[in-house]
Image: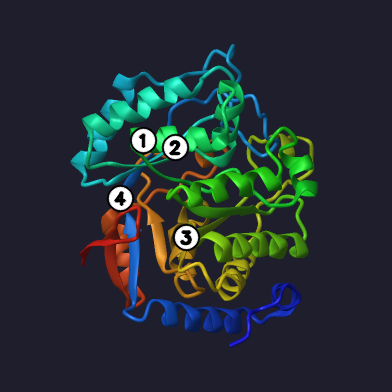
Amino acid sequence: MSRMSKEEAVELIKNGDLKSLGDMASDVKRRLHPKKITTFVVDRNINYTNVCWVDCNFCAFYRHGKDDDAYVLSFEEIDRKIEELLEIGGTQILFQGGVHPKLKIEWYEDLVEHIHKKFPTVTIHGFSAVEIDYIAKVSRISVEEVLKRLAAKGLSSIPGAGAEILSDRVRDIIAPKKIDVKDWLNVHRVAHKNGIKSTATMMFGTVESDEEIVEHWDLIRNLQDETGGFRAFIMWSFQPNNTKLQREGIVTHKTSPNRYLRLLAVSRLFLDNVKNIQSSWVTQGSYIGQMALMYGANDLGSTMMEENVVKAAGAANRMNQDEMIRLIKDIGEIPAKRNTAYEILETF
């Protein structure tokens, strides 16, 4: 079967029938996941700081160091959050900041080592490419050294955050201080070559074109051909409330559920070398999150015990393990709790 071209993907985004796209994406999903198992992970987002100098125009979460509500969590505060996660059977922490201008590699090493030694059963899935790149710069070491040193202390994998749209034109508008496309890809390439797996992400719904969306997928697909290091692809829509993009009238409205499902289905068709695609119920709500499972997604993502970044932009959807199990069973699939590596821990 020949590989979908960029031109074919753009044509499907623009003109494909929505129901037909769902059927096509479901066929691909069935080939990759013939046992009809839909997975999820029980985890907690821990935003260790909200101090950030990158000032993205789409972000409502960040603060500057002198702001009254700026914070860096103490190790004791982080411990309490992890203990609460363990009480509900959690297995993973998604660990992300702000890009704090003053924290260097030694602080991160101490933090990862502390968590890994105190909570050895918890997988540390943490630090975006933007954070890794800045830790390298402020510590005057290479990206590879940052990754190797954090992995030696217990970092397991890195999230795909900071990708937004992998187009320098778009990034110059929505996040002009953020690393460029080449540098984002390089952090993940270096991670993969050092045995650190990651996820790939995309945030759509700002100023990008259909062609730029497909170019983003193509860059992910090409790097996956090269390294095989992406475990999953996760796509979500921009949440405009309380952001600079909204205040300046650049992006005023959320994109529609139709648009989300359309892009999700085409991503499943295009990303033929990425096994797992995650539903974004956090931005879409639980029922569109469930619909996503019929448009190519095979993973319902995380119960996300704590989420602060999207919530700051006005989306406050919540879901627990029982509701995830119910939604998955409701469409005739088998719910399964997984770990960060997409290994099945328990079926329901």
Q: Are marks 4 and 2 in contact (CB under 8 Å)?
A: no
Mark 2 vs mark 3, CA separation in Å: 22 Å
Mark 4 vs mark 1, CA separation in Å: 25 Å
Classify mark 1: helix, strand or loop.
Answer: helix
**Residue depicted at x 59% and y 80%:** 21
- Nearest to N terminus: mark 2 or mark 3: 2
Q: Are marks 2 and 3 in contact (CB under 8 Å)?
A: no
Marker disc for residue 232: 3
Q: Report which residue position mark 2 lands on.
A: 148
- Residue 204 is situated, as x and y percent measured from the top left of the image, at 66, 54
Q: Do the residues labelled 4 and 1 touch (CB within 8 Å)?
A: no
Q: Report which residue position mark 4 lands on.
A: 42
Residue 287 showing in the rendered view: yes
Above or below 296: residue 47: above
Q: Are marks 2 and 1 in contact (CB under 8 Å)?
A: yes
Q: In which quarter of the image is the N terminus?
A: bottom right
Disc 2 residue type (three-letter) = Lys
Which mark's residue is nearer the viewer, 3 or 1? Answer: 1
The type of colouring in the image is rainbow
Q: Report which residue position mark 1 lands on.
A: 152
Q: In which quarter of the image is the C terminus?
A: bottom left
Above or below 306: residue 37: below
Above or below 71: residue 89: below
